[in-house]
Amino acid sequence: MEPDFWHQRWRENRIGFHAKTTNSLLEKHFHGLALAEGSRVFLPLCGKTLDIAWFLEGGFRVAGIELSEVAVEQLFEELGVVPKIATVGALKQYSAPGIDIFVGDVFALTVALLGPVDIVYDRAALVALPPEMRRRYAIHIPEITQFAPQFLICFEYDQSRMNGPPFSIDPQMVETLYSGTYQITLIEREQMADGFQGKFPASEAAWLLVK
Ligand SMILES: C[S@@+](CC[C@H](N)C(=O)[O-])C[C@H]1O[C@@H](n2cnc3c(N)ncnc32)[C@H](O)[C@@H]1O
C-alpha cells in the first residue's frame, strides 16, 4: 500500500478499520501479561484506535506511530488532550503526559526516537501491510523496540474472498515472519460474530511473541 492510499482514506473518512469499541481480545487477555503499572506500550500504525484510551485509563504509557496527521489530530481531539508538537528527524511527534505519537512512516522510526518499549501492541498493523512490506516490518519492529514482547492480533479468513487490506495472516505466516525472533504462543482465536463486516467467516487470533 502506498502512503497515498492511507492518506486518502483518512481525508475521505473511509476508515472502516477504526473499531467503535476497545478490542475484546485486548480487554480479555492483556492484564494476564502482568505488566507493571506505567509500562510503555508501543502501537505501530496506530490510527486513532480507542485501544489507546484504554491503555491510558489502565495506567499504561503509550507510544505510537501513524502515517496520517489527520488521524493523529483526531486522536488527541477525541482524547481531549492538547499535544505539544515537535519535528524530530523525518517525523513529527505529538506528545502529552504519558503519550507520544509519531507522525510519518514507521520505517523512519528509530530506537533513539522511540525510546524504551515494554510491549508492542499490534492490532490491524501487520495485517494492513502487503507481503513484501510485511517482511520488512517484521524485521524493523523487533529492532526499534529492542526485541520487546508483542501482543499481536491477526485476522484469519479465506484470502480468496477479498483482496486486503486487511490481509489474512494465518499461523503459518506468523511462524514464517517471527519464529526466528520470538517464541510464539497462541493466546486465543475468536470467531468474529458477524464474520468480516458481515460478508464471510473470519476469526481474530491473539498471539504472544516473546524473545
Ligand atoms: C488498518 S489501519 C489500523 C489502525 C489502528 N491500528 C487500528 O486498530 O484502528 C492501518 C493504519 O496504518 C497507517 N499506516 C499505513 N502505512 C503506514 C506506515 N508505513 N507508517 C505508519 N503508519 C502507516 C494507516 O494510515 C492506517 O491508519
Image: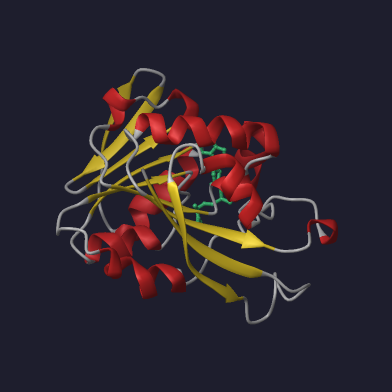
Could you say where residue 180 lies in the image, as x and y percent from the top left?
Answer: 50, 37
What residue is at 48 percent from the left and 44 percent from the top? 45
> Vertically, is 51 above or below 174?
below
Residue 104 seen in this snapshot? no
Could you say where residue 71 lies in the image, as x and y percent from the top left?
Answer: 47, 47
As drawn, which residue projects farthest toward the right?
160
Task: Identify which residue, 190 or 64, lies in the foreground.
Answer: 190
Q: Is residue 19 left or right of residue 133?
A: left
Residue 166 seen in this snapshot? yes
> Vertically, is 32 above or below 207?
below
What residue is at 69 percent from the left and 39 percent from the top? 130
> Vertically, is 89 above or below 165?
above
Please state the total of marks drawn on the protein image. Answer: 0
Quadrant showing the C terminus: top left
Could you say where residue 116 lies in the image, as x and y percent from the top left?
Answer: 23, 36
What residue is at 22 percent from the left and 66 percent from the top? 58
What colour scheme governs how the chains and residues are painted in the rendered image of this protein?
Answer: secondary structure
What residue is at 40 percent from the left and 67 percent from the top? 26
